[in-house]
Image (spheres, grey):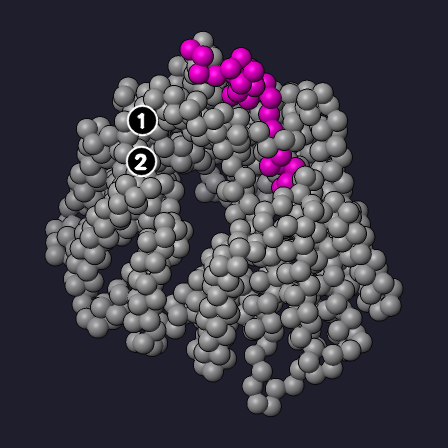
Amino acid sequence: MNPDVVAAVRRLGREGILTPAQSGLFGRVAGDELVSVRAELRLLLYGGVLAVMGGVGVLVQQNLDRLGPVAIAAGLWIAAAAALLWALRHAPPFSWGPAPSTHMAFDYILLLGVLLTGAALAYMEVKFTPLGTAWSNHLLVMSLFAAALAVRGDSRVVAGAALSTFAAWMGVSASPLERAFWFSGDAAAAARLNAAITGLLFVGLGYGLVQSGRKAHFEPVATHLGWLLVLSAILAGIGDQGAARLGLFVVGAGLAALAFWRGRFPLFGMGLIAAYIGLSALVVAGVRDAAFGFLWFSATGIAVLVGLLMAQRAMRERA
Amino acid sequence: MRAEAAEAERRFDVREAARGWHRAGAIGEAARAAIEAAYPDDRARLGPVFRVLVFGFAVVAVSALFGLFGLFMAEAFTRSNGVPLMLFGLVLVGATELQVGSLRRAQGGTEAATAFLGLCYLLGGMLWLVESARLGEAAWINLALVLVVVLCAAAAYRWGYMLFAAAAASALFPLLARGPWGRLTWVIVPVALVPALLRAGDSARLPPSHRRSCQAVAVVCLVFLYLAVHLGSWDLGLVEALTGEGRASRAPAPAPFRPLFAVATALVPVATFVWGIGARRRLLINLGLVGLLSSIVTLRFYVHVAPLWVALLVGGASALGLALALRRYLDSGPGQERHGFTAEPLFADPERRSTLEVAASVASLSPAARAIERPGFQGGGGRSGGGGATGNF
């Protein structure tokens, strides 16, 4: 409970700032007489989806011979269809604007349906190879399917899954643990290039969503993931390429400036950190001296601090 | 903690609550403005993104500055056994005092950075000094733990940072473990302290940050209580290993004790959960749930009740079913609530929750990337399900 808010609610009620009904409800919530467990229920749903998908993966791996491919494929398709049917029954009416579902579990069951469909499709592809040598295209099919469902169900979680599946089709895992980036050689360079292209496509998609006014509230998902991919791709190359360092500085600074102008704090932070790393890598790598390194980081650290405080003040005044 | 800083925290809590009410549409703009006028905020604060950036860059700048001093005075640093570290730490502590005092900064990033670094340098300097006294390893570890407990507790008391309080409590238990009845004290101390800490966490006499610190310490105490009675920790001699003498020093476990630990592993999370439900404390409910999950994993480790895929499928389906049933049960009550619980969001920030969910799903459910094709490459079959599904088929 929060005794300060309880006392404040009483005072605000006495002073007429809050109505009796308002102070009654707010006082109960602040005093822990009424507690929302929505976050816990959502966590339970999310954990349930993760566990089911983990179980499906192990089931397919360990019981392939015993159950047979047809039984496994049929089981996966039936489970996916059941989840998707439930989700579509509880879907909100379609709108190009925000249309949140009234059912708390909607997002999670839809996500489960999409994941099960993905598992079924991948399993079919591996066992029966209907796409032949174009086997990896099932990822593209899956990302389009997930995107369609995300738009229909107005689900940003499923939209995120659609984008990360598209990235996988482009040869990039959107997982932060993606390791292919960090190795050198042709494969790493190709992975970085793909990541940068995918990121730019996502940024373009976000821009398109806002310009068209269709599902504009999905824009942050696409834009944040896009910039993350672009900056990660450049960052991964700064170890052995001077151009990457300059690129990271220029792109990061550009993003920070654009985000500052538009009041987008998370993008501003991403851009600033990228620009700082890029510039520091350029300067410190050029002068291999410990004293200069310490001087550089202390001086620039203080300069960025002052700049940040000024930027924050400017943003606040503009708002 | 300074009285004016405590008062500012109380007002900030009310303003934050009003922001939540306004966001949920429960009050209008006029009411919100009236509340903000009634509870003015005199602190210089930053939003979460700027705060993290400022904290990070302050840590970089201050650490580099110290590195620069260290580079030019390396010999003096080595000869003075950590005194310069302590002096630098004291300067940073002074800087923190200045910021939270006359500069009236709160949640501004820089004061948290100087507080954190000041404590680190002070601790580092003291430990260096103690090490130079050549007391022996056991005494050095004991003294180091005492210093961590005292300094972190003092910092939490003075500046109200919950993390310092949790750090102090986390160092206290290894210190207790080094005594003759380590495991027993891990049980007695939480049982004695947690009810008092939770009561203090509701006390109007304490400022909000001290209340949160009490809750954080209560969480740490309960975690260590669970570790003390956990069957795996008993079998591994986890507490006894912290004495530095290893498992061998412990007398062989009396036979009746082991089942007791098995029962306690199951009962402690259940008791925590039930306590949370009874007292309507989300902190205890969440801790109980995490403990229950850990106990189920422990059970699966010791007893192979079912194949892994069955356990995961049944567990996942049960979690989904339980959440749906609970939601239906709560929604069907009068006013969509039962026993003081509701599934309605009340005044939580839906945008923040949604962002976290999207980030979590992208991070945890992203499919593996397909191999990038090069000349001579032969497709070898899919290993990713798309839509986030992964696995090797």
Can residue B300 be seen by looking at this rendering? Answer: no
Q: How far across and how far down the image is residue A171, in percent?
A: 56, 73
Residue at the (74%, 61%) spot, across then down: A117
Q: Is residue B363 magenta?
A: no
What kind of element bears circle 1? loop
| Magenta highlight: main SS | helix
Q: Work out whether residue A267 or residue B84 is closer to the camera in this orientation and state it.
A: A267
Can residue A235 be seen by looking at this rendering? Answer: yes
Residue reaching furthest bottom?
B376
Count of picture labels: 2
Can you tell which mark lies on residue B41?
A: 1
The magenta stretch is A15-44
**Quadrant in the picture for the N terminus of chain B:** top left
**Quadrant in the picture for the C terminus of chain B:** bottom right
- Other residues around mark 1 within 10 Å, as few (<14) / some (14–19) / many (≥20): some
Where is residue A127, by image quadrant?
bottom right
Q: Work out whether residue A284 or residue A144 is closer to the camera in this orientation and state it.
A: A144
Residues at marks 2 and 1 on the same chain? yes
Q: Work out whether residue B229 or residue B310 is closer to the camera in this orientation and state it.
A: B310
Q: Amino acid at mark 1?
A: Asp
Can you tell which mark lies on residue A122?
A: none
Q: In the displayed structure, would residue A189 be above or below residue A80?
A: below
Q: Work out whether residue A272 or residue B366 is closer to the camera in this orientation and state it.
A: A272
Q: In the displayed structure, would residue A319 be above or below residue A207?
A: above
Residue at the (28%, 50%) spot, across then down: B57
Q: How far across and how far down the image is residue A196, in percent?
A: 46, 71
Can you tell which mark lies on residue B45?
A: 2
B262 vs A295, left or right, is: right
Q: Chain of mark 1?
A: B
Residue at the (73%, 55%) spot, across then down: A113
